[in-house]
Image (cartoon, grey):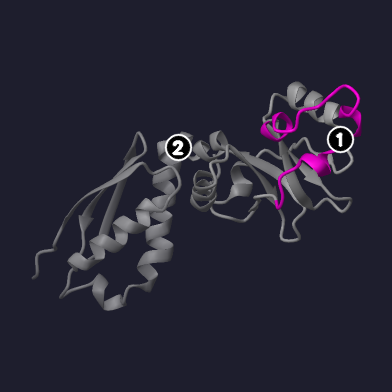
Amino acid sequence: MKHLHNVEDVMTHAVISVDRGTAFKDIVEALRMWNVSALPVLAQDGQVVGVVSDGDLLLKPQSADTAHDTTAEQLMTRPAVTVRKDATIPSAARLMARRHLKRLPVVDRDGRLVGVVSRGDLLKVFLRPDEDIGTEIRELIMYQLLPHIPAEAHVHPHGPIEVHVHVANGIAYLNGSLPDPAMEDIVLRAAGTVPGVVDVKADFTAPVSA
């Protein structure tokens, strides 16, 4: 499984949408057919201008005579709550929780619809194989974190830096040797940012000076 960092990595690319002129009954049929609770409403250029949900439909009683005259533009909630495709997974989860939403339209930098992300999609990160998570933690520490630590911290008299990583059921176990206790917090926080990590446990020791 590839690294999962951004919304684009977990979103559903095939999206059902309606345009502003879609009639009430056609919206109902689309919601029923695709078993979803809401649909993005698009302008002609593909930009998301609103969202119409089953709740929006229920709030506007329809008679047989008027239903065919009511359109998505009249029913939709605007402005639409959307998320950029390059947004991080945690930021999308926070937005979804804050707005009490189950799904979010995903847009590009121009506001055009490119996908949809659900709560279930955001949980995909926790299905990553432990081996993939461990590999990403090692790469993060070796190639992004350690190169920014002064070279003299890697050798005597402070002692060598050694970080061993083992992941089981999403829990990252880190051990080894760190010359400075302050580094432990940095390493733990870095490991915790890796998607799929449920918890981080550490057992570092201070190197013995020669």
N-terminal of the two: label 2 or label 1? 1
Q: Nearer the viewer, residue 40 or 112?
A: 40
Residue range corresponding to the magenta coloring:
55-79
200 sits left or right of 123 in the view = left
Residue 194 visible: yes
User: Crowding at label 2, few (<14), some or many (≥20) Cα neighbours within 10 Å?
Assistant: some
Q: Quadrant of the N terminus?
A: top right
Query: Image quadrant of residue 12?
Result: top right
Q: Nearer the viewer, residue 63 or 14?
A: 63
Residue at the spot of label 2 = 126
Q: Rounded to the nearest whole Å, what is the CA distance between mark 2 and mark 1?
A: 42 Å
Q: Amino acid at mark 2?
A: Phe
Task: Give the residue displayed 54% in from the left and 37% down from the top.
Answer: 119
Q: Nearer the viewer, mark 2 or mark 1?
A: 1
Residue at the spot of label 1 = 70
Residue 177 rendering spot, x and y as whole percentages? 20, 59
Q: Amino acid at mark 1?
A: Thr
Asked which secondary structure carries label 1, the reply is: loop
Residue 95 rendering spot, x and y as whole percentages? 53, 50
Asked which secondary structure carries label 2, the reply is: helix
Task: Give the residue displayed 65% in from the left and 50% down from the top.
Answer: 81
Query: Image quadrant of residue 149?
Result: bottom left
Q: Nearer the viewer, residue 34 or 128?
A: 34
Query: Which label is found at residue 132?
Result: none
